[in-house]
Image (cartoon, rainbow, N blue to C red):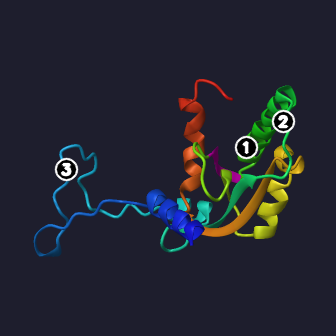
Amino acid sequence: MRKFSLLIGLSLFLSSCVITKGKDGQPGKAGENASNTSSKNTFNQELATELGADKYGMKPYVIVMLTTGTTKIEDKTKMAELMKEHLANIGKLAKEGKVVVAGPFTSDNKQNFEGMFIFNTKSKEEAESWVKTDPAVKAGVFGYEILPWYGSAALPLYLKHHEEIAKENP
């Protein structure tokens, strides 16, 4: 149930929007800082097709939750090298368009989730083949759980801006 709640919360966070209603069901007045005061639909069929969007602008993905694995590596140098390889693999998968979100959780949790991937596929089998390329998964430092997910087809677009805002790569 907690996993379901986490997924619902993540889905709502990623696809949230603010809608205002004015008088008689007409669009409400835009706020002071609004950059677009037009209620005109700006649907882009070419972009929707390119991203694989359905009529709602959504598409299926696969979330892989990385969990604490069965292997503990005490040697800090070996663990640091393994994490360096883990991050390099994430970068490779991102450049190939396979992973659209990846990152660690920043606090302990009851589910022992260490991090997550959102893979750009609807196939659990394909996502599993991609997560198995991870050196930390291969070493047993991370286990994983696979969950189908439905979210905005525009999710992959944020990656093109990441390099513009990151001063360093870990």
If you read the primary sequence from the N terminus, does the residue marked by circle 3 or circle 2 appear first? 3
Are the two marked residues, 2 and 1, in contact with CB atoms closer than 8 angstroms? Answer: no
Q: CA distance from mark 2 to mark 1?
A: 20 Å
Q: CA distance from mark 3 to mark 2?
A: 49 Å
Which structural element holds mark 3? loop
Which structural element holds mark 2? helix
Q: Quadrant of the N terminus?
A: bottom right
If you read the primary sequence from the N terminus, does the residue marked by circle 1 or circle 3 appear first? 3
From the viewer's side, name the closer residue of 117 and 94: 117
Task: Categorize mark 1 by other alpha carbons within 10 Å: few (<14), some (14-19), many (20+).
Answer: few
Give, as a three-letter code, the residue at label 3: Gly
Task: Categorize mark 2 by other alpha carbons within 10 Å: few (<14), some (14-19), many (20+).
Answer: some
From the viewer's side, name the closer residue of 103 and 69: 69
Q: With 122 as the anchor, is 107 left or right in this view?
A: left
Mark 1 = which residue?
95
Depicted 67 relative to depicted 161: above or below: below
Magenta segment's dominant SS is strand
Return the mark for residue 82.
Answer: 2
* Residue drawn 55% across the image and 65% down it: 7
Magenta range is 99-104
Report if residue 59 is visible in the image.
no
* Residue drawn 66% across the image and 70% down it: 148
